[in-house]
Image: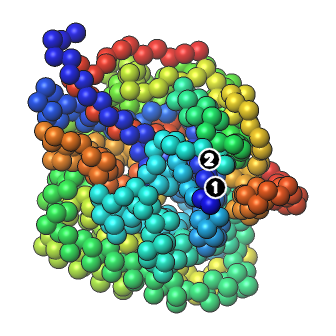
Amino acid sequence: MSDKPETRRIVIEPVTRVEGHGKVTILLDDEAKVKQARLHIVEFRGFERFIQGRPFWELPVLVQRLCGICPVSHHLAAAKAVDGIVGVDTLTPTALKMRLLMHHGQFLQSHALHFFHLSSPDLLFGFDADVSERNVIGVAAKYPELARQGILLRKYGQEIIKATAGKKIHGTGAIPGGVNKNLSLEERDQLLSEIDQIMEWARGAVALAKGYTLEHLDDLSGFGSFDSNHLSIVRSDGAYDIYDGGLRARDAEGNIIFDHVENEKYDEYLAEEVRSWTYMKFPFIKEIGPEAGWYRVGPLARVNNCDFFDTPEAEKERKEFKSLTDDKPNNITMAYHWTRMIELLHSVEKIQELLNDSDLQGEDLVVTGKRRDEAVGIIEAPRGTLFHHYRVNEDDQVTMANLIVSTTSNNEPMNRAVQKVAEDYLSGVPEITEGLLNRVEVAIRAYDPCLSCATHAMGQMPLIVELMDQQGRIVDRKIKG
Amino acid sequence: MSKPKIATTSLAGCFGCHMSLLDIDERILELAELVEFHKSPINDIKSFSAQCAVGLIEGGCCNEENVEVLRAFRSNCDVLISVGDCAIMGGIPAMRNMIPLEECLQEAFVDGPTVHNPTRAIPNDVEIPLLLDKVYPCHEVVKIDYHLPGCPPPADTLWEALVALLNNKPISLPYDLIKYD
Ligand code: SF4
């Protein structure tokens, strides 16, 4: 042990207003300068292994139990892979549109939850606001109308999911080769009766996020920010798409690294590094390598990556957003919120379009094909690109499962954001206040990490922020049992 | 008189049970009239500083940290409720109980098709809590007063149960609110 055992350890546990549990540790040197800051995922589930042996048709309902925040994303990514297993490449129009409607309902509910229920308190009250006020109940007390809109936007998204998947959380709508129901006229009319109001609130949400970002641009530009590559799927014509498309990656300047990569080839382009101190892996672009090949996913990456939105209002908002950076990628971490609300508006536009499409009342729900033994399903989940890859044997049992969940891809970016905020705000300050530590969480929250999902292999993360000196304990860990 | 307090946590769960609680929608505001939210993932209260009337537990115990949190909930909550399949019987995460833990770790960190792990080392650090040999239901770790089944229990189930408890009435739930999927 050293002569200078001046250990300083502050624990905030768990990190809150994120979905799931996580832990941050910050090491300070003798001069109270930040030496190292890390975000750890501390739980482990083992899905990849324990679903081996299960019949493949269980996957869409089983694997979604990774995550109750955006179960539809896992439900649909698994369903797309399972379509591949049963040899179906093209769904019926009714089945495809029912899934799209479900997916946009999911984007609406998840983005509303993240923005209004979890993040808005930081934006409305400030990063240093009192803990007793800095939450959704506090928002409801001070901005009742805004809180109500957030709650009802989310509710509408959940109602869409219920109408398409049968249940708000962990539904069963997607089945191998299609869906198990269409949308009744009654369900449609009920949903349509509210859409104008929802659209109005969605516009308001974009205005709020945009106004906040522009007003605080000087402070936010550097906050937890850095240049990065960006990854998402895009439609074959370059349009924004969340259900189907090829993989596209751009660098921080906007140059294309790869484009329209077929889903089945994802593992030729991406790999995941394992590090000893967290259960969450670190994905990277193979061609560039683990050092510099990491990338961001999610709303910011998608809006940076796509060429256009195929709905008018979101496209108008995208153009305005991109004009801020002369059409180059925007690398501001806090800009995630703005792009998230642009996506929310796009999903409401898509929902309206779909609800008016009579294909949803079609009766042709399922197609069959020739059985295959391996398939990959990739979609965009609210938090970013989601990969499901399965192999099955002739008895229909899963023999291999590989899942790269959205939050995993943001592992390196979140760690960088934590490091940056820690260095900028905590380094060498005489007193580390609650508000300063909240800044670390604010940066993590921008990514809307689903630590619950990220847990699939890893576990959930209780977010704990700890400060300690450089002698921070190093003890060997053994696994019990 | 101050309002009774409620605390919630997610252990080895998927957060779906918390989402179902949020699915009471506008009634969240009514609930906020009835109770004060104490430690919960939806606010920034990180540890107990007061005794709570009700604690809601989502998820079972898969690591030592889950056990610590669950024990803290038992000591600080008058009534403890296991919410959902995972808390009540381990749920989907307990599917790993049939398989040696080492095999699960090996698959995730060494054998997976996209894994880049030249040293083949499995994460092992003082900062990540020890995994338990199995995933345990909450009532095997502490005394649990009520069990609300479902995956997740419907929002109305949570609402009816909470309102009854907070008004000192017996919880009576019709069949369709307590059936498991
Ligand atoms: S019971 Fe279901 S919804 Fe609740 S935590 Fe477990 S898997 Fe998620």
Under mark 2, the amino acid is Cys
Percent position of residue B130, x then y: 50, 22
Whether residue A311 is visible here, answered yes or no, is no
Q: Spatial distance from mark 1 to mark 2, Cα to Cα?
A: 7 Å
Location of mark 2 (residue): B52
Horizontal arrangement in the rendering, residue A18 relative to residue B24 (left or right): left
Would residue B88 be found to the left or right of residue A378 on screen? right
* Residue B83 falls left or right of residue B176: left
* Disc 2 secondary structure class: strand
Looking at the rendered image, the quarter that the N terminus of chain A falls into is: top left
Chain where mark 2 sits: B
- Give the residue at x 21% y 74%: A214
Residue A243: x, y in percent? 48, 64
Residue A442 occupies quadrant: bottom left
Which quarter of the rendered picture does the C terminus of chain A lie within? Answer: top right
Crowding at mark 1 (Cα within 10 Å: few <14, some 14-19, many 20+):
some
**Tags 1 and 2 touching, CB below 8 Å:** yes
Q: Is mark 1 within 8 Å of ligand 1?
A: no
Residue in the foreground of this view, choosing between B112 and A477 = A477
Q: Name the residue under label 1.
A: B4
Residue at image location 36% in from the left, 86% down from the top: A312
Same chain, labels 1 and 2: yes
Q: In this view, does A220 lie to the left or right of A383?
A: left
A310 or A42, which is in the foreground? A42
Q: Which residue is pictured at 17% across the width and 35% down the height?
A: A34
Instruction: Report x, y in % for residue A230.
Output: 26, 55
Q: Where is residue A453 in the image (x, y as percent from the top left)?
A: 50, 46
In the rendered picture of this protein, how many numbered marks are placed on residues? 2
What amino acid type should be assigned to the residue bearing mark 1?
Pro
Mark earlier in primary sequence (1, 2): 1
